[in-house]
Image: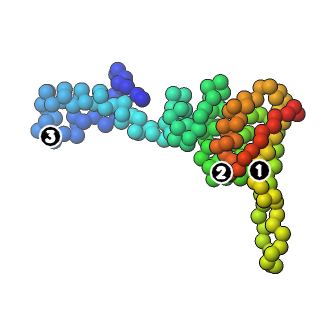
Amino acid sequence: MRGIVDGLPSPHPLGSTLPPIYLDDNLTQRITAGLDEVLAPVLNVLDNLDAYIDPALALSDFYEWLAGWVAVVLDERWSPDRQRALIAQAAKLYGVRGTPRGLAAHIALFVEGDIDIEETGAATWSVSPGSAVPGNPVPHLKVRVRATDPGSVDLRRLETVVAASRPADVPHDIEVVAR
């Protein structure tokens, strides 16, 4: 991802680390200086690795690479701040993936508006066996987005987000309405 940068000094020159017999050898010092020039960008990246993998600090050409680490597809039309926010939130969202709260949070990163999620399933406990089971036995998920401008919502992308974040094998419907 990074290449040779003319004039970039090596933070760890090799020539000075050689045994004393080679410190005054001109040929050896020139060879190690050449290696220093090639290795300087690599060593600088490794010394600053945290700046490359932190979404708040990463360079713009690393966004797509970081997004690939957390399995997120970025929208090129978004501002860099919004792309950084999505990458930073992605790992947290996987902890609540498949829940209504997680689905709403994931949708909110892609769509501006109010998000309502209706699901048919439920869970409870009872001290008496054979009591009624909550919810509906047929699983279904309804996602309703109330947007200021419903026409601005990319339905294909919204469908992809919902399909990736909903509980597995649960059919869903999406409805986009005006606020």
Q: Is residue 75 above or below residue 91?
A: above
**62, 54: nearer the viewer:** 62
Contact between marks 2 and 1 (CB within 8 A): the answer is no
**142, 46: nearer the viewer:** 142
Q: Residue furthest bottom?
A: 128
Judging by the rendered image, the residue that carries numbered circle 1 is 140
Q: Residue at x 48, y 41 (%)?
A: 50
Q: Amino acid at mark 1?
A: His
x, y (%) of residue 173? 77, 41
User: In the image, which is nearer the foreground, mark 3 or mark 1?
Assistant: 1
Kind of element beneath mark 2: loop
Judging by the rendered image, the residue that carries numbered circle 3 is 20
Q: Residue at x 81, y 58 (%)?
A: 136
CA gap between label 3 and label 1 equals 75 Å
Colour setting: rainbow
Kind of element beneath mark 3: helix
Q: Give the label on residue 168, or none.
A: 2
Q: Residues within 10 Å of mark 3 (few under 14, many from 20)?
A: few
Quarter holding residue 164: top right
